[in-house]
Amino acid sequence: METKATDYEKYQRAKEKVAEIKGFYSHLLSFVFVMAFLIFVNLKYTPQYLWFLWTFFGWGIGLLFHASRTFNIVPFLNSDWEQRKIKQYMDEENNKNKFI
């Protein structure tokens, strides 16, 4: 039995999506500014060893995961997959309870 989403539910989902995108862009902006500062410090004081690369790659991996979740790049991380799994487990639970 599938119910149609009300306008309020649609609004709430859209609002959550906008908040996710805003959070990603905040994350991206802080990444750019902090990395620019670290690159400057690294190249000014210890140019013989590029230690900023460790931070760049570590934080960059986190940023990539954040982007993949926000923009549904990886199929098993998107909200459609989550909703299908939730529905599947709820249906399984309902079917199990019918036989008890």
Image (cartoon, grey):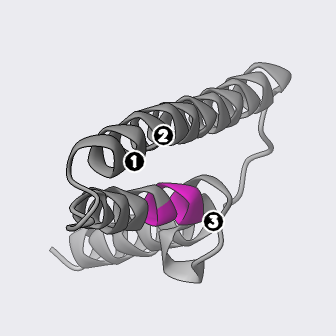
Q: Earlier in the sequence, mark 2 or mark 3?
A: 2
- Depth check, front residue: 37 or 100: 37
Report the magenta residues as a range. Answer: 64-69
Q: Residue furthest left?
A: 100
What residue sits right under mark 3 in the picture?
A: 80
Q: Earlier in the sequence, mark 3 or mark 1?
A: 1
Q: Quadrant of residue 48?
A: bottom left
Q: Is residue 81 magenta?
A: no
User: Could you tell me the amino acid type at mark 3?
Assistant: Asp
Q: CA distance from mark 2 to mark 3?
A: 36 Å
What residue sits right under mark 1 in the picture?
A: 39
- Depth check, front residue: 40 or 69: 40
User: Which image quarter holds the C terminus?
Assistant: bottom left
User: Could you tell me the amino acid type at mark 2?
Assistant: Ala
CB contact under 8 Å: marks 2 and 1: yes
Q: Which mark is residue 28?
A: none
Residue 67 % position (x, y): 57, 58
Q: Please tell me whether mark 2 sits on a helix, a strand or a loop.
A: helix
User: Could you tell me the amino acid type at mark 1?
Assistant: Ile
What residue sits right under mark 2 in the picture?
A: 36
CB contact under 8 Å: marks 2 and 3: no
